Image (tube, grey):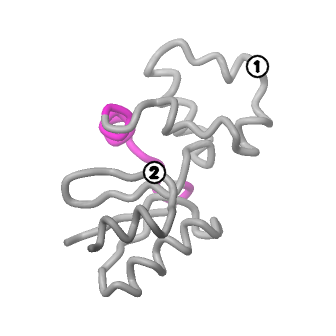
Amino acid sequence: MSFQIVGLKRCSTCVKAKKFLEAHGLEVEFIDVREHVPSAEQLQTWAAALGWDKLINKASQTWRQLDDAAKDLASEAERIALIQAHPSVMKRPLLIYPGGFKLGFSEKSYQELVA
């Protein structure tokens, strides 16, 4: 099985997720969203599977620092533009695995995935 983690290099939760999968003998490709900004097509795919409300982390420091006009996301194009301009507003880690996607990290949910 091939796994990708989309997140930030310095995000402690992303690091934990990667280490967990590697400890279970899985090969993991890490993609830093600041270095490799997701394409509109990728974001649309992830949002279709997970929902924009889950993909955009409104509890993040980046979100809180945005002005109200930037937070007014009336269309999919505006959501895509927001994440592309501010990749750290995306909830992370985003785990991409054969057959699906998973947002966030918990040992229990990852354990179920690798079992």
Q: Residue at x 45, y 51 (%)?
A: 103
- Given residues 91 and 71, the one toward you in this image is 91
Q: Position of residue 20 (x, y in %)?
A: 45, 78
Which type of secondary structure does the marked residue at label 1 adopt? helix
Which type of secondary structure does the marked residue at label 2 adopt? strand
| 58 relative to 21 in the view: left or right | right
Disc 1 or 2, which lies upstream in sequence?
1
Q: Do the residues labelled 1 and 2 touch (CB within 8 Å)?
A: no
What amino acid does circle 2 point to?
A: Leu
Graded by Cα atoms within 10 Å as few (under 14), some (14 to 19) or many (20 or more), the crowding at tag 1 reads: few
Q: Which residue is drawn at 19% across and 53% down?
A: 99
Q: Specify start and end residues of the magenta stretch as a single range.
A: 34-48
| 113 relative to 95 in the view: left or right | left
| Residue that label 1 marks | 68
Q: Which residue is drawn at 37% across and 71% down?
A: 111
**Position above or below: 27 against 78:** below
Helix, strand or loop for the magenta stretch, by majority: helix
**Position above or below: 3 against 76:** below
Q: State the quadrant of the N terminus.
A: bottom left
Q: Nearer the viewer, mark 1 or mark 2?
A: 2
Graded by Cα atoms within 10 Å as few (under 14), some (14 to 19) or many (20 or more), the crowding at tag 2 reads: some
Q: Residue at x 51, y 55 (%)?
A: 104
Q: State the quadrant of the C terminus.
A: bottom left
